[in-house]
Image (tube, grey):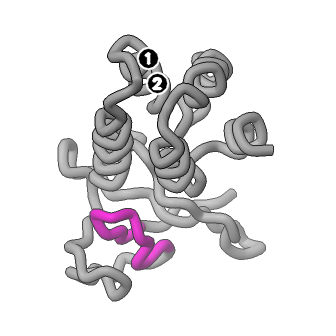
Amino acid sequence: MGVYHYATICTNGHIVNESAYKYTPFCQTCGKETVSNCQKCETDIRGAYSTEYGYETDYRAPSYCFNCGEAFPWTKMLLNNAIELIALDDQLPNDIKEIIKNALPDLIIETPSTPLATAKYKKFIPSAAKYVQDGLKNLLVDVASETVKKALWG
C-alpha cells in the first residue's frame, strides 16, 4: 500500500518539493511565494505517491484541493489569464467568448463535461484571433489532460 507525501508549490505552479515536508518560502524558479496547504481549508497539498517500489514519476501539481475542491492559486491564475486573453479579442462576439470561457475548467480536469467542452473549444476557437488561439494553447498545453491534448492538438 502506498502513501501520499506533502508538496510545496509556488503560486505560479512550479513544484518546489513533491515528496517531503520541507517548507521553502519562495520558488527558486520564479521567486514567487510557495504554499504547502490549501488556502481555504488548510489541508496539506498532496505530493508524489510512493509505494514500497518507489515514487511515482509523473507528479503534476494538482489543480484543486482534494479535501474541499477549492482551486489552487496557479489554477485560478491560469483560468483568469485565459479569460483575460479571450477578452482581448475585439472581433470575437461576446456569446462565443462566454462559450469558450465556460469550457475552460473542463479542459484542465477530466469530468463528464470534458468531451462537450472539447467540442465547444474546437468549434469556436478558430473564430478567435491567432494570438488568442496561440496564447490559449500555451496556457493549456501543460495543464490539460492527455485526452484533451490529443483531441485538441493531436
- The three-letter code of the residue at mark 2 reads Ile
Residue at 47 percent across and 31 percent down: it is 104
Let me know if residue 71 appears in the view.
no
Secondary element type, mark 2: helix
Q: Which residues are magenta?
A: 7-18
In front: 127, or 153? 127
Specify the label residue 96 is tagged with: 1
Residue 23 in picture, x, y percent from top left: 28, 79
**What residue is shown at x 53% (from left), y 39% (from top)?**
108
Q: Position of residue 82 (x, y in %)?
A: 38, 42
Residue 54 on the magenta segment? no
Residue wearing tag 2:
100
- Mark 1, secondary structure of its residue: helix
Disc 2 + disc 1, Cβ < 8 Å: yes
Crowding around mark 2 (Cα neighbors within 10 Å: few <14, some 14 to 19, many 20+) is many
* Residue 60 sits in quarter: bottom right
Q: Quarter holding the N terminus?
A: bottom right
In x, y percent, where is residue 43?
28, 51
Tell me if residue 51 comes above or below residue 76 in the rendering: below
Determine if residue 119 is in view. Answer: yes
Q: Residue at x 36, y 68 (%)?
A: 9
Question: Which image quarter is the C terminus in?
Answer: top right
Where residue 45 sits, quadrant-wise, is: bottom left
